[in-house]
Image (tube, grey):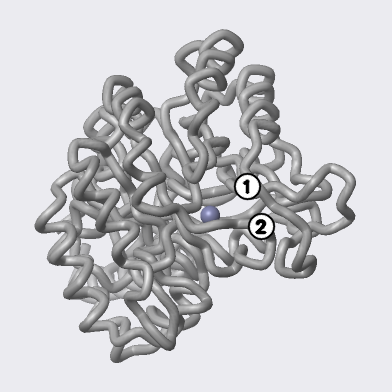
Amino acid sequence: MNDVTADKHSAFCYSFSMLILAAVFLFSGCSTTTLPKRDLASFSQPSACYDRQLEPSTPVVDSHIHFRAFGGKSIPFTEINDYFRQTTIRFANIYGIGQVLPADSSCTYYLDCPGTPVLPSIKNDMVNAANYVEFPSEDIQLVLSMTFPDMAKLEDVQEIIELYDKEYPGLFKWAGEINLVKQALLQNGHVPVTKADINKWGAFMELLRQRNIPINFHSDLGNDENPTKYLGIMEYVLQQYPANKIVWAHMGLSKELAHMDATRHTKLMARLLNTYPNLMLDISWNVLNTHYFSKPAIRAVYVDFFNTYSERILPGTDFVASRNKNFEVYEKELSETSSILQDVDDTAFRNIALGENYFRFLSLNYQAPDICQ
Ligand SMILES: [Zn+2]
């Protein structure tokens, strides 16, 4: 090859390579999220590192999702599993609902029907268990939860657990979400638990400990007039049952407590986490994003807190599967409830979003991928 031909040749090569690069770029959709989604099996062994630039920031765990509606029709069980397949969720707890409208009520949401009693029931646990057995899912790891106990009157709990054991032996591996105090329900017959009630939980909590079953409590911390009005209830439970695996739903926040000072709240949570090593916090419910995580100054406080206590946080949507919702609603709630996880550090992202906390907490034989450096 003489010099001129060589020059022409290299110019051709350069243009050709640029063309190839452009084609690759075009065919990749110019997108940064084209890596294939991880399947369940990839969590049973060491897998490729997780690239936070190219892979989604939504979690692989939904630890708090209600498969049943308060009343009216629910989304079919298999359809909810399809929602998981279409998103990043590979692990989920099957919650019933801790408050059920009467069968003869036309309500689907308790706030629309003040005066109508909504009380715990075994109905939804039984429907969930039947579906769990009838529609086994190979590609989604589901954990069945019992949501029936009324913590203000536990008299019949032993009998009901015997019934569960008889019908579905060994299937219920989680408990909750169970209401201790939920201000939104005070007009629907819900009565907050008292210290006298909590003192009577001994046998039930012992049974949970023996079976390594965590329990998720919804216990409002307070309201905007008095942010720590009900702190005493949750703290008394923690004092009485420090050896139980307890999850505090929504970190005690709610629509009624929408403006608590973030520094005050995180300091309080930190004190409880330091004092009670078996306590975990669940950051589910898009209400937390609306009132706290979506506001930059407040978000920064929680990002710091999650980084510091990254082993103590569980993600969840708190989606309630009533039939007036669809996949778009689930997808939106998933992205809202996990938006803050984009900003946490790599260790926290692996622990919270990639499931490491959930696996450890439930002693599941799975592992989160490492984060790519
Ligand atoms: Zn919930």
Q: Quadrant of residue 131?
A: top right
The residue sitting at 45% across, 75% down in the picture is: 289
Residue furthest to the bottom in view is: 297
- Relative to 267, say whether 64 is above or below: above
Q: Nearer the viewer, residue 93 or 22?
A: 93
The residue sitting at 31% across, 48% down in the picture is: 354
Q: Nearer the viewer, residue 220 or 190?
A: 190
Residue furthest to the left in view is: 274
Residue identified by numbered label 1:
83
Residue identified by numbered label 2:
189
For label 1, the SS is helix
- Amino acid type shown at disc 2: Gly
Q: Nearer the viewer, residue 67 or 259?
A: 259
The residue sitting at 83% across, 58% down in the picture is: 107
Circles 1 and 2 in contact, beta carbons < 8 Å = no
- Relative to 274, say whether 73 is above or below: above
Quadrant (top left, top right, bottom left, bottom right) of the N terminus: bottom left
Q: Nearer the viewer, residue 51 or 248?
A: 248
